Image (cartoon, grey):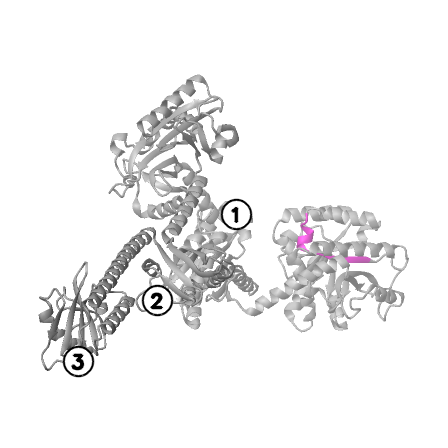
């Protein structure tokens, strides 16, 4: 049997100091009993327990105890036992020890037989051993009790810490070691691998931002005894932060020395989270109360104010300070106060919401009151419904008036909240029935589609929907179908009725029959874009379509052409047959033009006798497009050459056509139209009855003329013009007068002759101020000459343009110039052109008669190249004819020019008119004309046009063959 020390067996002798005491007991027993060894054995256990030993090795102890154990179990008194010969100790003595708990005894061993010890000694030894064992038993029981109490305390502490979420720790300052409870480890998430054993281990468990702080607090507590209580974040395994409350206090000895720090941590994450949740809830509540736009108050269970928001202060017209603690009905009339009290009390008693609507005289408003009970009292909303009440009061009047409105009114439900996606009509007024022909019974519950032609209405409905999305109301114009199928125009305004910001419940449509207005607008639009006489597109529509054609050409690459058509001599038809015949001709021309071009081409009338044809999509090849445009223009030209029947009269007319092409590169329709116009005028200059394509040189000419026109205005303001005079001599060489010829002294270009600026002056209308200026200068020169005998009989011929002559005040302006300068009228000679005789003959003759009555001399310039006829010539109060220099230049070489010159001279003589030949360059020309009877001559043979200074010198000293008579 193996024996083991009792201190190493479970359940007995747990304190190591007891074994050493019992070993000393066996040593003393061996000495007193003169034994070689001794064992203290508890025989109540199986195997026996060795309580103490002396003088034996562990092997000898086991061997001796094993040999003696069977014999000793039955012995209750002192007895010597002789063991087997092979036992190491032959002599053995068992000394029972009376133990209060077990059966113990001392086994004294000797190697040889010895004198026995006295019984008294052995008895005393046994008694002492019993006392020692009893003391050991009591100590064991005390330690066991203390251990049990400690375990129970630790269990209660662990349970308390776990329940409170707190764990304790202790820092031994001498060793810097940390001891902690299980709950401490649980809070920090410590596992078996990660334990806190030192101060630094514990500090590292705190969040980085808190470590310095907790270290300083621990140091102050260790050095100064300053306790601490902090809420700090720690980091548990996994890096998750956790809020803990850390408490520490110093533990001192009796002398005041600090030996350790005792502390605890408590998990307060839940409290922190609750605080944050509470804070967020409070903020949301504050925000919610602040966001309530209605008047909102809270009342306690006695219906006294406990809270008012800003809107309620405004509505109730009192501040929070004035109302807190007062009953809500205080200050109101008795009847209103009682009704309010009854309703609010009922809400508190039944724990149900109540609503009432009443008039508050002191506020002058109708208020809606809604009360909601809660634990502490009532939440009450006040809403000003004065306007709604007024609306309700007017609703019956409105319904009555709507039903009798002349405007169409229809209301439709949108189908919100149902499966029906189409609106349904729920109300129509009398005007709806009158205009559409449908009765209420026929349309209620139907969709508005029954009134619309969907295809033409779709764009309008989309426009309407877009407007309703943006502004909740929209206006449009569309056609509505009557019951009989007829359509009529309605100006429709639709307003949405919304239950919420997102939900539209009804559409209210108000319509007005605008059929007459639309008809008038169509007529106005037609008048605005179409010619009233020919029903062709006018200039405005042409420019718009031309802009579209340019854009399409730019996209497709197709070339197009523009034809500008002007009827030749149309004015003569108006003047001879009347404007009615002219209008008929224009209508027939419009019809022929429309028939002669493609359906896709556009024919427009710009005004007067001007037409434009626009053709597009000719070809992507420029040459092919030009060929097609030429062919079409020639077709138009030939079509308009055919005779027209005008009220039984056959009339022939011819056109002048200007053509320009476009391919999308141009972007100025006005410029394109001007190019065709220039080409048309070029065709007219070529003799009319033809067509001409635009040439960029034409544009250059026009640009140059525009520059000249601009410079002419400056020249007139700055008086850059000068008058040169060319002498006129009679048959014997006497200077009888001069012709005033204007020159332009340009500051950059020098002296400019009339041929370079007079046409531009004619076109721009500047010929009027320029002609008047020449007339004034000529009269002033005549007045200067009148004072000199040598020049007092000279006359000055002044050229008068057609536009100048036809000015309504021309005669008055001539009279004013004569009166201002005081000249003799017959010394002023006005040279008129034959183009004056083309039209307005009676007016021309009357004006000439008035000038003649003033005494002014009248001369017909460039005779033979214009419109003169003998029947007209004989009626004109002329004094002189001038043979055009074109006839004079070839009078010696061209028999025709010679014959014409002779005829003009003979005609003038027969009418008692003087004849002046201009452009005489040679003596032979002068002699021939003189021989034929010409009265006066003018040309470089005698003198070129001269400035007034040179002329005065010539008059002072005439050249050979010229005389000046005083």
Q: Residue reaching furthest top? A: 334
Instruction: Tell me if residue 804 is in the magenta stretch.
Output: yes
| Residue occupying the point 67% across, 73% down | 893
Q: Which residue is mark 2?
A: 195
Q: Position of residue 938 (x, y in %)?
A: 76, 65
Q: Position of residue 107 (x, y in %)?
A: 17, 71
Whichever of labels 3 and 2 marks the residue nearer the N terminus, that label is 3
Q: Residue reaching furthest bottom? A: 86
Q: CA distance from mark 3 to mark 2?
A: 56 Å
Residue 439 can be seen in this image: no
Q: Nearer the viewer, mark 1 or mark 2?
A: 2
Whichever of labels 3 and 1 marks the residue nearer the N terminus, that label is 3
Number of residues whose C-alpha sits closer than 10 Å to that of mark 3, classed few (under 14), some (14–19) or many (20 or more): some
SS under mark 2: loop
**Rendered image: mark on residue 577:** 1
Q: Quadrant of residue 677?
A: bottom right
Q: CA distance from mark 3 to mark 1?
A: 183 Å
| Residue occupying the point 51% across, 66% down | 692
Q: Report the magenta residues as a range.
A: 795-807
Number of residues whose C-alpha sits closer than 10 Å to that of mark 2, classed few (under 14), some (14–19) or many (20 or more): some
| Residue occupying the point 69% across, 53% down | 804
Q: Which residue is mark 3?
A: 111
Number of residues whose C-alpha sits closer than 10 Å to that of mark 1, classed few (under 14), some (14–19) or many (20 or more): few
Q: Relative to 358, does residue 757 appear above or below in the rendering?
A: below
């Amino acid at each position: 049997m193996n024996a083991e020390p009792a201190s190493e067996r479970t359940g007995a002798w747990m304190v190591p100091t007891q074994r050493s005491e019992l070993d000393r007991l066996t040593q003393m027993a061996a000495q007193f009993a003169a034994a070689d060894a001794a064992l203290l054995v508890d025989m109540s256990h199986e195997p026996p327990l060795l309580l103490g030993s002396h003088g034996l090795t562990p092997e000898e102890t086991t061997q001796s105890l094993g040999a003696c154990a069977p014999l000793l179990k039955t012995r209750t008194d002192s007895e010597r036992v002789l063991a087997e010969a092979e036992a190491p100790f032959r002599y053995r003595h068992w000394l029972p020890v009376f133990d209060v708990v077990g059966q113990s005894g001392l086994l004294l061993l000797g190697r040889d037989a010895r004198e026995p010890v006295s019984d008294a000694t052995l008895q005393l030894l046994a008694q002492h051993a019993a006392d020692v064992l009893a003391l050991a038993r009591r100590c064991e029981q005390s330690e066991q009790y203390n251990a049990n109490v400690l375990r129970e305390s630790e269990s209660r502490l662990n349970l308390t810490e776990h329940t409170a979420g707190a764990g304790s720790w202790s820092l031994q300052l001498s060793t810097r070691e940390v001891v902690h409870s299980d709950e401490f480890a649980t809070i920090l998430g410590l596992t078996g691998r990660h334990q806190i054993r030192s101060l630094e281990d514990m500090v590292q468990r705190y969040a980085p931002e808190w470590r310095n702080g907790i270290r300083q607090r621990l140091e102050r507590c260790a050095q100064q005894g300053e306790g601490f209580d902090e809420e700090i974040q720690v980091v548990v395994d996994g890096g998750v932060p956790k809020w803990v409350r850390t408490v520490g206090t110093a533990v001192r000895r009796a002398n005041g020395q600090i030996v350790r720090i005792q502390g605890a941590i408590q998990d307060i994450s839940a409290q922190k989270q609750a605080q944050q949740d509470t804070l967020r809830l409070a903020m949301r509540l504050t925000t919610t109360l602040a966001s309530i736009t209605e008047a909102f108050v809270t009342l306690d269970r006695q219906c006294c104010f406990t809270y008012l928001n800003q809107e309620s202060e405004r509505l109730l017209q009192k501040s929070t300070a004035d109302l807190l603690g007062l009953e809500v009905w205080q200050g109101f009339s008795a009847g209103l106060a009682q009704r309010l009290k009854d309703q609010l009390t009922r809400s508190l008693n039944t724990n149900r919401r109540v609503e009432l609507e009443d008039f508050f005289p002191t506020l002058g408003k109708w208020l809606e009151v809604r009360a909601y009970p809660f634990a502490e009292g009532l939440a009450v909303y006040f809403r000003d419904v004065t306007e709604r009440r007024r609306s309700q009061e007017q609703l019956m009047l409105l319904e009555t008036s709507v039903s009798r409105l002349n405007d169409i009114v229809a209301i439709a439900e949108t189908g919100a909240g149902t499966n029906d996606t189409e609106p349904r009509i729920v109300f129509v007024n009398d005007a709806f029935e009158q205009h559409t022909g449908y009765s209420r019974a026929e349309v209620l519950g139907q969709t508005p589609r029954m009134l619309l032609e969907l295809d033409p209405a779709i764009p309008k409905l989309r426009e309407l929907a877009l407007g309703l999305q943006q502004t909740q109301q929209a206006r449009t114009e569309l056609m509505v179908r009557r019951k009989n199928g007829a359509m009529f125009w309605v100006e429709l305004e639709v307003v949405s009725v919304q239950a919420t910001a997102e939900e539209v419940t009804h559409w209210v449509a108000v319509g007005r029959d605008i059929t007459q207005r639309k008809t008038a607008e169509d007529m106005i639009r037609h008048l605005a874009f179409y010619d009233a006489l020919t029903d062709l597109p006018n200039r405005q529509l042409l420019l718009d379509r031309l802009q579209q054609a340019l854009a399409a050409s730019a996209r497709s690459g197709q070339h197009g052409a523009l034809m500008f058509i002007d009827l030749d001599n149309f004015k003569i038809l108006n003047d001879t047959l009347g404007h009615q015949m002219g209008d008929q001709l224009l209508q027939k021309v419009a019809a022929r033009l429309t028939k002669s071009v493609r359906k896709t081409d556009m024919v427009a009338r710009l005004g007067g006798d001007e037409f434009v044809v626009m053709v597009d999509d000719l070809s992507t090849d420029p040459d092919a497009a030009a060929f097609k445009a030429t062919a079409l223009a020639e077709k138009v030209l030939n079509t308009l050459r055919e005779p027209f029947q005008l009220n039984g009269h056959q009339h022939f007319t011819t056109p002048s056509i200007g053509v320009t092409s476009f391919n999308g590169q141009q972007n100025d329709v006005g410029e394109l139209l001007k190019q065709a116009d220039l080409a048309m005028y070029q065709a007219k200059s070529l003799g009319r009855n033809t067509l001409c394509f635009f040439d960029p040189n034409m544009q250059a000419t026009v640009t140059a003329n525009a520059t000249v026109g601009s410079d002419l205005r400056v020249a007139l303001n700055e008086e850059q013009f000068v008058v040169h005079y060319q002498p006129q001599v009679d048959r014997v060489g006497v200077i009888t007068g001069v012709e005033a010829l204007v020159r332009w002294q340009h500051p950059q270009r020098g002296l400019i002759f009339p041929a370079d600026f007079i046409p531009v002056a004619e076109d721009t209308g500047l010929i009027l101020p320029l002609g008047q200026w020449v007339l004034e200068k000529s009269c002033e020169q005549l007045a200067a000459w009148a004072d000199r005998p040598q020049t007092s009989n000279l006359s000055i011929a002044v050229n008068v343009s057609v536009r100048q002559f036809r000015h309504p005040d021309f005669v008055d302006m001539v009279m004013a110039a004569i009166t201002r300068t005081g000249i003799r009228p017959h010394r002023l000679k006005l040279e008129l052109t034959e183009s004056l005789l083309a039209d307005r003959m009676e007016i021309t003759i009357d004006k000439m008669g008035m000038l003649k009555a003033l005494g002014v001399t009248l001369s017909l310039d460039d005779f033979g190249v214009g419109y003169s006829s003998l029947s007209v010539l004989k009626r004109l109060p002329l004094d002189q004819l001038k043979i055009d220099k074109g006839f004079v230049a070839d009078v010696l070489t061209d028999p025709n020019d010679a014959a014409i010159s002779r005829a003009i001279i003979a005609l003038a003589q027969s009418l008692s008119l003087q004849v002046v030949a201009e452009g005489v360059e040679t003596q032979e020309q002068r002699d021939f004309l003189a021989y034929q009877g010409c009265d006066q001559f003018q040309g470089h043979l005698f003198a070129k046009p001269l400035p007034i200074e040179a002329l005065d010198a010539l008059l002072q000293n005439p050249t050979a063959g010229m005389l000046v008579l005083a």
